[in-house]
Amino acid sequence: MTYNQASLTSMHCINMRKDMDVETEPICSLAAARRAVAAYHDKQTWISLQQNCMGKDLSWGPSARAYHDIYSHLIQAHNKAVR
C-alpha cells in the first residue's frame, strides 16, 4: 500500500469519525497504522513529517495559556453577572 492509498483510507475515517462506532473504530485505527507505515517507507514523506513535527511547540505552554485564557474569561463573566 502506498502512502497516498493509506491517506485516502484515513481521510474516509476522519470524515466519518463523528459517527464512529465499535465496528468502524478498529478499521480506522488500522488505516492510521497503515498510513504511518507507508509514510515511514516513503523516505521523502517521512523526513517531511519529522521536520514538521520537530518544528511544532508540543510543550505545555500553549495549552496552559489557552486554559488560563478560558478561566480568566469565565471569572470575568461571572464577576460581571454577580454585580
Image (cartoon, rainbow, N blue to C red):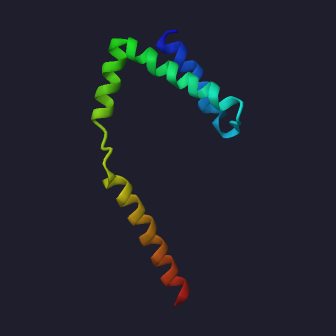
Number of marks: 0
Direction bottom: furthest residue: 83
Residue 63, position as x, y percentages in the image: 38, 54
Between 80 and 13, the one lying in front of the other is: 13
Q: Residue at x 50, y 77 (%)?
A: 77
Q: Residue at x 48, y 83 (%)?
A: 79
Residue 28, position as x, y percentages in the image: 60, 27
Would residue 18 be found to the left or right of residue 7 on screen?
Answer: right
| 12 relative to 40, above or below | below
Q: Residue at x 28, y 27 (%)?
A: 51
Residue 41, position as x, y percentages in the image: 39, 12
Would residue 56 be found to the left or right of residue 71 on screen?
Answer: left
Residue 45: which quarter of the image? top left
| 57 relative to 32, above or below | below
Direction top: furthest residue: 1
Between 28 and 65, the one lying in front of the other is: 28
| 13 relative to 58, above or below | above
Between 36 and 13, the one lying in front of the other is: 36
Q: Residue at x 30, y 48 (%)?
A: 59
Residue 65: which quarter of the image? bottom left
Residue 56, position as x, y percentages in the image: 31, 39
| 12 relative to 38, above or below | below
